[in-house]
Amino acid sequence: MSSKPRHPEKVNKPFNPIKKKPEWIRSKMLDSQIFFQTKKVVNQNNLVTVCQEANCPNITECWSKKHATFMIMGDTCTRACAFCDVKTGKPGDLDIFEPAKIAKAVKSLNLKHVVITSVDRDDLDDGGSDHFYKVVKATREKNPETSIEVLTPDFLRKGEAYKKVLEADLDVFNHNIETVPRLYTTVRPGARYFASLELLKNAKKFNKKVFTKSGIMVGLGENKEEVIQVMDDLRSAEVDFITIGQYLQPSPKHHPLNRYYHPDEFKEFEQIAKTKGFLLVSSSPLTRSSYHADEDFRKLQDARNKQLECLPHQ
């Protein structure tokens, strides 16, 4: 009996050979003992991480530093984004014990900063916002000194459900724009570019204290001018932090990789983004939305404090 395919919607897609990675696309393991310790905590608590499910290239480096991005509400997504390696299908019931499990794992790993993301749950009336709230609340209660970052879905057609997430005591609200608007119909067919922008804008409007963050991948077929336009759109939505990273094709059935960008091109994007007024910019081939998230949170705090110091005193 054959097992169900991980991506049933991609079975009949054309075969796109994966281009050989250049020498600058290399991740590193810093401390293998800590890597296996992190893996043990994740497995013992039956937790799902985006590091594993999305086949992240930075898993060895991040887990060696006790960095893990927890993925809540299961391992199966209701969307079928062409770039993503997370399993697609009909998700199971929510785990009512998950908030306590995540809180316990954060404590066990002694995390100073935690990133909590999720699959899309279009099957739920609120898109999973109440579950997000419960996970953040439980994590905060057990880990009062830990900064908390959420990487949320778009809550498309869920009204004001996103507000429930922002009512939790979190520090960073992240929602990735992923690509340029022209490519949405092929890269993110279940999402809407301007709905994602509106979510980021409304998040900042609803909770001014929370840092807002968004990321874009390059290498999907966009051009430089389109990437710069996304920067402008994100600043119009008052996004504080932008991440720009290289798209890495997970399999021959995923969206084809158009090209690899050279590290110098990422440096140029970083310089351009800085002139737009972002508090923080992370732009490199291996940049992912959760990569170095703990260090970046400290940098965000410092940047905001400097900004406040420059304001005229009343």
Image (spheres, rainbow, N blue to C red):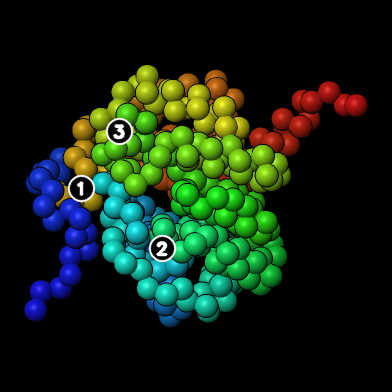
- What residue sits right under mark 1 in the picture? 254
Residue 175 place in picture, x, y as percent: 49, 46
Q: Which residue matches tag 2?
A: 123
- Helix, strand or loop at disc 1? loop
> In the rendered view, would you say 266 is above or below 146?
above
* x and y percentages locating residue 112 in the rendered image: 61, 59
Is 118 or 163 nearer to us in this picture? Answer: 163
Residue lying furthest right in this view?
314
Q: Quadrant of the C terminus?
A: top right
Mark count: 3
Asked whether the residues under the numbered discs 2 and 3 touch, taking CB atoms below 8 Å apart as contact, a structural biologist would say no
Which kind of residue does numbered mark 3 sit on?
A: Leu
Residue at 84% from the left image edge and 23% from the top image edge: 312
Q: Nearer the viewer, residue 52 or 238?
A: 238
Tell me the CA gap for discs 2 and 3.
Answer: 25 Å
Q: Give the Cα separation between the discs numbered 2 and 1.
A: 24 Å
Indicate the amino acid at tag 2.
Asp
In this rendering, is residue 163 above or below 311?
below
**As shown in the figure, which amino acid type bears the numbered disc 1?**
His
Check disc 1: other Cα within 10 Å, few if <14, some if 14-19, many if 20+. Answer: many
Identified at 50% across, 24% down, the residue is 232
* Of 28 and 250, the residue lying toward us: 250
**Which comes sooner in the sequence, label 2 or label 3?**
2
